[in-house]
Image (cartoon, rainbow, N blue to C red):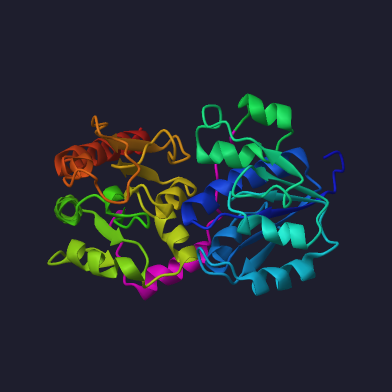
């Protein structure tokens, strides 16, 4: 890794949150090799997020669905990349993820030992889950020399996505957003219902926040639209934007919020990367493993004896880890944070 103008190819992850956390790796690579170029192979949906990362020089969309082999697409991309790169860093642990760098004949190919990847990677690193106990640490470690990576003793730069102020102005006009201070809500969680705070809780919290003088913006994908409708039902000063905005729009709308309330989801990591105050709700997952990468966060986690189970649905059938996380508790924290901000602003 001595060549300061190294041409690096990163095989990116398949989830929104993981792609945001991958910026910590890109920042590390650029800090250590300022002249290096970084290209990222990633699903097409992630291109708008990667374009908000100044460290990324090129995005190479791979038109393959989640879990799909797509051998022809991988082979076609690999043929275009042949001879262009010195080193490949493979973040996912599947064997499919290692195919493009192998077929592109990139001389150095590093990744963790995974599904039968022995011939595909030149440098196969053993994953010590005790040392590399967070997803983001695992990503960053693959950009470091082996000895330093194995120690776990290295800095993790926090993701920071760029904001498009002109786009924000257009979004505020297009969706008739008001001048009230905004609170974002992200009720979705791609992984499953054991990571989702009850919709009735979101609705009750939205009602209180509107009464407090806030505007509430519900953000998510098209599949979250029905949930968003339940949250805003019968409430003034609320906007269900689920499915009405692109991923890059969510970056700008979140940056414009005073605070956000979110499940452990991809949009939580986007919110962390724009610096907004976060209230992160954890149920089946662990704030120790996938925390929002920001100092500006309050973690709401009951830490029940059955938590974290990391299941998609509650194996005990009650989802108490989230059902018992009260609207009162979250509302009080938001109120306290707002008061603290007012004191700072007003001196």
Magenta stretch: includes residue 174: yes
Residue 242 visible? The answer is no
Q: Residue at x 34, y 61 (%)?
A: 219
Q: Which of the pair 285/219 is nearer the observer?
A: 285
Is residue 160 among what the camera can see?
Answer: yes
Q: Residue 161, how many percent across, how many down?
A: 55, 52
Image side of residue 56 versus residue 261, left or right: right
Q: Quadrant of residue 229?
A: bottom left
- Residue at 20% x, 61% y is 231
Q: Is residue 177 above or below residue 324?
A: below
Q: Which residues are magenta?
A: 156-184
Residue 97: percent from left, percent from top:
63, 57
Residue 78 is covered by the magenta coloring: no
Assign the C terminus to one quadrant of the image.
top left
Q: Is residue 79 left or right of residue 69?
A: right
Number of marks:
0
Q: Nearer the viewer, residue 23 or 193?
A: 193
Quarter the N terminus occupies: top right
Q: Could you say which is closer to the camera, residue 78 or residue 135? A: 78
Vertical arrangement, residue 213 with respect to residue 59, above or below: above
Q: Where residue 203 appears, x then y in whole percent?
A: 17, 56
Q: Residue at x 25, y 41 (%)?
A: 334
| Rendering coords of residue 120 (x, y %) | 72, 52
Q: Which residue corresponds to the image point at 15% horizontal and 50% vertical from the top-left?
A: 208
Lateral position of residue 6 relative to residue 186, left or right? right
């Amino acid at each position: 890794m001595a060549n300061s103008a190294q041409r690096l190819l990163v095989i990116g992850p398949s989830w929104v949150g993981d792609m945001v956390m991958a910026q910590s790796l890109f920042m590390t690579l650029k800090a250590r090799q300022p002249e290096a170029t970084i290209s990222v192979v990633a699903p097409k949906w992630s291109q708008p997020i990667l374009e908000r990362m100044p460290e990324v020089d090129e995005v190479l969309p791979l038109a393959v669905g989640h879990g799909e082999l797509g051998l022809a697409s991988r082979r076609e991309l690999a043929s275009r990349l042949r001879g262009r790169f010195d080193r490949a860093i493979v973040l996912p642990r599947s064997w499919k993820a290692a195919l493009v760098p192998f077929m592109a004949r990139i001389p150095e190919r590093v990744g963790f030992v995974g599904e039968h990847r022995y011939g595909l990677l030149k440098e196969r690193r053993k994953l010590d889950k005790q040392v590399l106990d967070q997803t983001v640490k695992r990503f960053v470690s693959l950009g470091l020399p082996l000895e330093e990576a194995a120690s776990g003793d290295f800095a993790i730069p926090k993701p920071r996505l760029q904001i498009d102020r002109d786009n924000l102005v257009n979004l505020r006009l297009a969706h008739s957003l008001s001048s009230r201070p905004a609170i974002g809500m992200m009720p979705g969680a791609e992984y499953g219902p054991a990571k989702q705070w009850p919709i009735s809780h979101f609705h009750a919290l939205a009602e209180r926040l509107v009464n407090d003088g806030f505007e509430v913006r519900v953000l998510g994908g098209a599949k979250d639209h029905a949930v968003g409708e339940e949250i805003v039902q019968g409430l003034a000063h609320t906007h269900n934007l689920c499915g009405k905005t692109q991923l890059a729009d969510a970056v700008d709308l979140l940056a414009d919020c005073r605070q956000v309330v979110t499940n452990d989801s991809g949009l939580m990591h986007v919110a962390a990367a724009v610096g907004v105050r976060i209230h992160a709700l954890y149920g089946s997952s662990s704030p120790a493993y996938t925390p929002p990468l920001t100092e500006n966060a309050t973690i709401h986690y009951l830490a029940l004896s059955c938590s974290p189970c990391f299941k998609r649905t509650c194996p005990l059938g009650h989802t108490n880890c989230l059902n018992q996380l009260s609207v009162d508790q979250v509302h009080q924290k938001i109120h306290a944070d707002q008061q603290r901000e007012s004191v700072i602003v007003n001196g």
